[in-house]
Image (tube, rainbow, N blue to C red):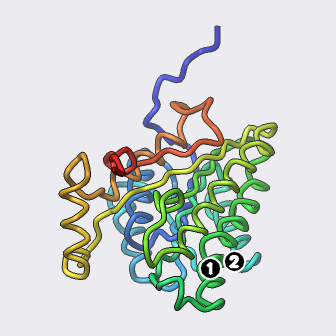
Amino acid sequence: MHDLPQETDDLAGKVALVTGASGGIGSGIARRFARARARVVVHYRRDARGAEAVVGDIESIGCHAVAVQADLRAPEGADRVVEAAAESFGRLDVAVLNAGVQPTRPLADMSYADFRAVQESNVDATFLVMQAAYRAMRDEGGALVAIGSILGAQPRPGHAHYSVSKAAVRMLVRSAALEYARHRVRVNMVSPGLVDRPALRQEWPEGVAGWESGNPSGRLGQATDIADACLFLCTQASRWVTGQELVVDGGASVRPTW
């Protein structure tokens, strides 16, 4: 009989990369992984101050982190963040591919440039970091988690380019899970519903009210909800799970449509 792991909420000795970790969901994932005793690479593209604040929070609880700037839409940027893990901590065990954009624009008014910009940030960058991280993990194994969205399965006006990008990420995850399994690299996806952030209620009061009144759980998601789901998929608790999508939306996707 195989020995079962003694701790499932534990990344002690592991090195984790979180892309897009200077704020929002990404910063919540980075902080949660640090509390699970991982050493964390905090990636950012523009918000150096936010990334350094996350590093400071992690260091304040006695854990280790480093901030790394890179544009992940180019292969050299993806390579840079993965190399930073090896340079800073000697290895890479876990990567959460969170970086992305979510602009809104009606489909009829969307230019080709608008469409391509979202695919580059959400699909191309995910592909490039996934590939680079796999190369770093294939000798020892590891876990990759891509952040999707419930909009990847259910369209919403103004989000066609975003929905297409997250649907593409879903198939990328499944394809990677199939091909990477022989090297003990698991690949999964967490798809959030509407997650709270600063100023959201002021910027979109009608949307927040509609979500809260119609969602079975009666509330918005929090970054910690998404972080805990990612943590599960990166520990031994999910050791036989790969190629799967974990929807974290308070029940929004099970609401009747008629």
- Amino acid type, label 2: Gly
Residue 113, can we see it? yes
Looking at the image, which is closer to me, 107 or 244?
Answer: 107
Residue appearing at x 34%, y 62% in the figure: 194
Q: CA distance from mark 2 to mark 1?
A: 5 Å
Quarter holding the N terminus is: top right
Residue 37, can we see it? no
**Up-down relation of residue 108 to residue 250 (above or below):** below
Whether residue 156 sits left or right of residue 118 in the image: it is: left
* Residue 231 drawn at (x, y percent): 47, 45
Could you tell me which secondary element the residue under label 1 belongs to? loop
Residue appearing at x 38%, y 49% in the figure: 35
Whether residue 198 sits left or right of residue 49 in the image: it is: left
Q: Are marks 2 and 1 in contact (CB under 8 Å)?
A: yes
* Residue 248 drawn at (x, y percent): 40, 49
Residue under pointer 2:
77
Q: How busy is the neighbourhood of tag 1: few (under 14 within 10 Å), some, or many (20 plus)?
A: some
* Residue 140 drawn at (x, y percent): 75, 41
Looking at the image, which is closer to me, 229 or 110?
Answer: 110
- Amino acid type, label 1: Ala
Could you tell me which secondary element the residue under label 2 belongs to? helix
Residue under pointer 1:
70
Residue sticking out furthest to the top: 1
Label disc, if present, on residue 150 of the rendered structure: none
Residue appearing at x 41%, y 52% in the figure: 227
* Residue 167 drawn at (x, y percent): 60, 60
